[in-house]
Image: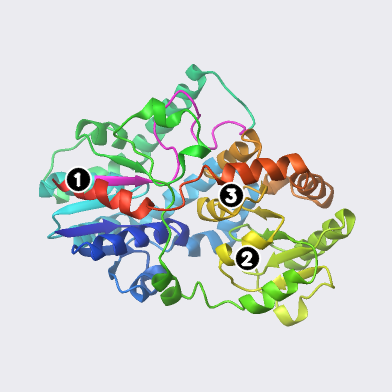
Amino acid sequence: MRISIPLTGTRGDVQPVVALGLELRRRGHDVLLGAPPNLVDFVAATGLAVRACGPDIQQLYSSDEGQRALAAGNTLRLMHLVARQMAGYAEQMNREVIDVCAGADLIVATTVTEDRASSVAEALDIPLASLHYFPCRDNAAYPFPGSLPPQWNPPAPVNRATWLLAENVRRIVFMRYLNALRATLGLPKSRAGTAAVLARADVPEVQIYDPALVPGLPELWGARRPFTGFMTLDHAAREAVGDLSGDHRTILSWIDEGAPPVFFGFGSMPIRDTAAVLAMVREVSARLGVRALVSAGWSDLDLADAQAGRDVKVVGPFAHDVVFPRCAAAVHHGGIGTLFESLRAGLPTLVCSVSFEQPMWGGQVERLGVGAHLPFTRLNPPRLAHAVASLLTPERKAAAAAFATTLITEGACAHTADIVEGRAR
């Protein structure tokens, strides 16, 4: 079977779907991925067939305007920025999705490509499955991510109202571009939103994050939205893309010299002054009497010049599952991949959220008793010290360790591939 998977977004969007593509290829299917131009080489390194698809979102986020929008912590402002980029790219994006899907027997889309993929699947008269990285459908249990303060616990009618508003905004904003695609495909215009279109076609919407993070939601949604857990790359693929090439021996040796450190990783955060952030980590480390392992992936720090004393170590890339089990707690932006790694290692986790679904995950770790949430816009030494201190209590450590045992750590790719193959049948 020929399976096409059009993707766009950042590496966090692409990597778990690459894991699925490899599993489908192992089962004998002919798999083609569409990936943003900055991630084509990443996909190709795993041996999967790949074509360019979609704009370079990372370039947008790294621009001055993108950094300002991220630093403001305003999801609507960032959505507007992304929508503006997509508007300029819409016609080319339509062509690229059509090209990736040409000749396919089945299409697998994601949260950010399902709108276009549904029209292409309709035109080709082939089945479609969609993968969701976070709750992005109407429900009574949780509001639309970013629409309300994450610490709120609103009643069901309020939650549903946020989804109604969000779906209508998305439908109105993207209708013109989607109808241009439909005209190219020879399909009639449509005023329906993507959620309604997929519901009518009974398209499975696979939730590729852990059900333990969203208590109550699996029961509300039922069989059309199965939860499979987070999909991870196998050892060979991780070696191919360089995930295992970090200096783990040096990192682990430093960890073993003293008490387990707190991990600070500011990847994807709009850091303007890396020296100030490192100084803040040093201050928090000294104030709390803890060691700090700092990921320099978010900056242009020269590692040789960034060592900050005996109790603070700045490091380059490393494999989370190798290092996290030796840490005491984790501080990061709350992307679902990093969040999964810190929680499955049993680490109390502080989410310093920026936008989109990250504030929701921050609210959830706090609500579940396994961590804390501090929006990036409120980050300063006293608040960071207070939040990190809350992670290091015996009660929080025990809760995080217990929660880790509830997570799906095996079989996510196989389960998702079973659903995809079942859709074809």
Residue plotted at (81% across, 45% down): 386
Q: Indicate which disc, 2 or 3, sits on the residue closer to the N terminus.
A: 2
Q: Are marks 1 and 2 in contact (CB under 8 Å)?
A: no
- Residue receiving disc 1: 422
Task: Give neighbour class at mark 2: few <14, some 14-19, many 20+ (Cα, 10 Å).
Answer: some
In the rendered image, the vertical position of residue 39 relative to residue 226, given as above or below: below
Task: Give neighbour class at mark 1: few <14, some 14-19, many 20+ (Cα, 10 Å).
Answer: few
Q: Indicate which disc, 1 or 2, sits on the residue closer to the N terminus.
A: 2
Secondary element at tag 1: helix
Residue occupying the far bottom of the picture: 304
Judge left or right: residue 355 versus residue 352. left
Judge left or right: residue 1 versus residue 212. left
Quarter-wise, where is residue 147 in the image?
A: top right
Secondary element at tag 2: helix
**Any part of residue 373 in sight:** no
Q: Predominant secondary structure in magenta?
A: loop
Residue plotted at (38% across, 30% down): 168
| Residue 393 shown in magenta | no
Please tell me which residue lies in front, 124 or 392: 392
- Residue receiving disc 3: 343
Please tell me which residue lies in front, 22 or 385: 22
Q: Horizontal and vertical percent for residue 208?
A: 40, 47
Magenta stretch?
Answer: 129-150
The dot on residue 323 is: 2
Classify the position of the C terminus by image quarter. top left
Quarter-wise, where is residue 89 in the image?
A: bottom left
Q: Horizontal and vertical percent for residue 80?
A: 48, 45
Secondary element at tag 3: helix
